[in-house]
Image (cartoon, rainbow, N blue to C red):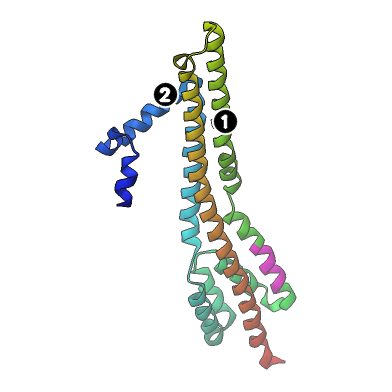
């Protein structure tokens, strides 16, 4: 029932399978001032950045609990070298931070903590790469839309001034351009904002995993040193 109600509000040609044609037609109608192209470019480039980040983050995301168990087991069975090998063979920032800490284990707990913090910051910069541009496109898309709105209204008033009269047919074209650019700009920003929030939430979860894993690493190394005290 919900889907049927939604389809009732769509143009007939869209419900008949021509939604792409409708979008292309509306794009061309709203492109009178040339502001549709910048909006389209922000959408395409923004989506490219978003998909690249999502793929990268999915590859970096591992089962942290399982990894921690494996590293602890390696520490107990084969010592530091075995744990380092497990980290080297595991992808993702959690394993990289672990390996950085293990490489400094012989310098004491303070050195391990410094290594973990330093490599954690580096890994965070890699995780957040491209987000500044995605945020920029989220801001630019509605701005281009509003600029097209102003342009359309200027055209409408130019038509009124030229004709010396106000009639719906004179201003309809300019107002239509104004509304279409606004709609496309806002829709682009909404789509990119959704991906941005998803990416940020995924990064936050990976960072939390790194922090928890770092605490586990320091505790494990302390336990490893305990018998020798």
Residue 22 x %, y %? 34, 31
> How many marks on residues?
2
Residue 3 x %, y %? 31, 49
Q: Secondary structure at mark 1?
A: helix
Give the residue drawn at x 37%, y 32%. 23
Q: Is residue 41 visible?
A: no
On the image, which quarter does residue 124 sit in? bottom right
Residue 194 higher or lower than 44, as above or below: below
Lateral position of residue 142 relative to residue 118, left or right: left
Sequence-earlier tag: 1 or 2: 2
Give the residue drawn at x 55%, y 21%. 153
Q: Nearer the viewer, residue 30 or 104?
A: 30
Residue 80 x %, y %? 59, 80
Q: Which residue is mark 1?
A: 146
Q: Which residues are magenta?
A: 112-120
Residue 45 higher or lower than 161, as above or below: below
Q: Residue furthest left?
A: 16
In the rendered image, residue 206 lying in the magenta stretch gets the answer no
Give the residue drawn at x 58%, y 48%. 131
Main SS class of the magenta portion in the image: helix
Badge 1 density bin: few <14, some 14–19, many ≥20, Cα 10 Å: many
**Disc ID at residue 29:** 2
**Disc ID at residue 117:** none
Residue 166 higher or lower than 139, as above or below: above
Residue 50 x %, y %? 49, 48
Badge 2 density bin: few <14, some 14–19, many ≥20, Cα 10 Å: some
Q: Is residue 142 visible?
A: yes
In the rendered image, residue 118 lying in the magenta stretch gets the answer yes
Q: Nearer the viewer, residue 183 or 71?
A: 183
On the image, which quarter does residue 217 sit in? bottom right
Q: Secondary structure at mark 2?
A: helix
CA gap, disc 1 and disc 2: 16 Å
């Amino acid at each position: 029932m919900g889907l049927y109600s939604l389809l009732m509000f769509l143009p007939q040609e869209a419900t008949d399978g021509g939604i792409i044609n409708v979008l292309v037609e509306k794009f061309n109608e709203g492109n009178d001032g040339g502001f549709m192209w910048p909006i389209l470019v922000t959408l395409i480039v923004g989506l490219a950045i978003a998909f690249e980040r999502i793929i990268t983050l999915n590859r970096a995301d591992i089962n942290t609990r399982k990894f921690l168990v494996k590293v602890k087991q390696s520490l107990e069975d084969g010592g530091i070298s075995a744990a380092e090998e497990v980290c080297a063979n595991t992808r993702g920032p959690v394993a990289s931070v672990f390996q950085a800490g293990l490489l400094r284990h012989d310098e004491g707990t303070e050195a391990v903590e410094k290594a973990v913090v330093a490599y954690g910051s580096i890994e965070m910069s890699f995780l957040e790469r491209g987000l500044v541009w995605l945020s920029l496109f989220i801001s630019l898309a509605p701005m281009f839309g509003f600029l097209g709105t102003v342009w359309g209204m200027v055209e409408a008033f130019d038509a009124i001034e030229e004709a010396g009269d106000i009639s719906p047919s004179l201003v309809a074209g300019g107002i239509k351009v104004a509304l279409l650019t606004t709609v496309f700009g806002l829709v682009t920003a909404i789509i990119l904002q959704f991906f941005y929030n998803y990416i940020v939430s995924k990064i936050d979860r990976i960072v939390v995993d790194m922090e928890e894993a770092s605490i586990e690493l320091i505790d494990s190394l302390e336990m490893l040193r305990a018998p020798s005290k």
